[in-house]
Amino acid sequence: MGSLLGPFDGQVIDQSTGSPLASALVVGTWAFQETGGMATPESSYTETVVTGSDGSYALPSLPTGRQFAGLLRRFTLIVYKAGFVGYRSDLRFDDRSPRHDFVQRGNMVRLDRFPQGESHVRHLVFLGGGPVLRGAAQAEIIQASLEL
């Protein structure tokens, strides 16, 4: 059993070596919709942490004051580390199929090295936005602009 309210924790490792990945950006976003009528987005709340030297991360529960901001629709976890293909808790990068292996506690995130010739534009679109992620991905944003 899990809860969209959190908390969330796990470890980020290099898929090819099994080594923990320190300093990976972990972004958790809770999305809300209005409670009446049509399913209209209302707001979101984001928490950001960086993995420790052992690749571990821990995101706290959604703060109590935010828990009734509207109907909680979803929680999405994104992990980004330069030089690696990012991770989303809801989608896979390769074929954009839904991910079914995300767990709230003890989640194991295995990042593959970014393949030579892969599109940085495609990767950034997959990851989504947000100011913290854009800041961490500046070098990749430059690479993406060169592709256009």
Image (cartoon, rainbow, N blue to C red):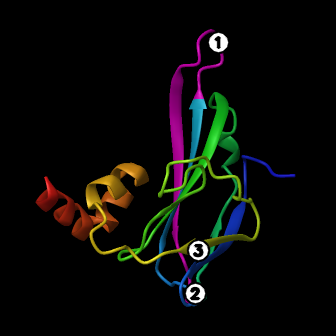
**Helix, strand or loop status at disc 3:** strand
Q: Which mark is residue 110?
A: 3
First reached walking from the N terminus: tag 1 or tag 2: 2
Q: CA distance from mark 3 to mark 1?
A: 39 Å
Where residue 85 appears, as percent x and y from the top left, is 43, 68
**SS class, disc 1:** loop
Looking at the rendered image, the disc whose residue lies closer to the viewer, 2 or 3, is 3
Q: Nearer the viewer, mark 1 or mark 2?
A: 2
- Residue at mark 1: 36
Q: Is residue 7 left or right of residue 59?
A: right
Under mark 3, the amino acid is Arg
According to the picture, the residue beneath numbered tag 2 turns out to be 20
**Type of the residue with mark 1:** Gly
- The quadrant holding residue 142 is bottom left
Q: Is residue 47 above or below residue 79?
A: above
Quadrant for residue 132, please give it.
bottom left
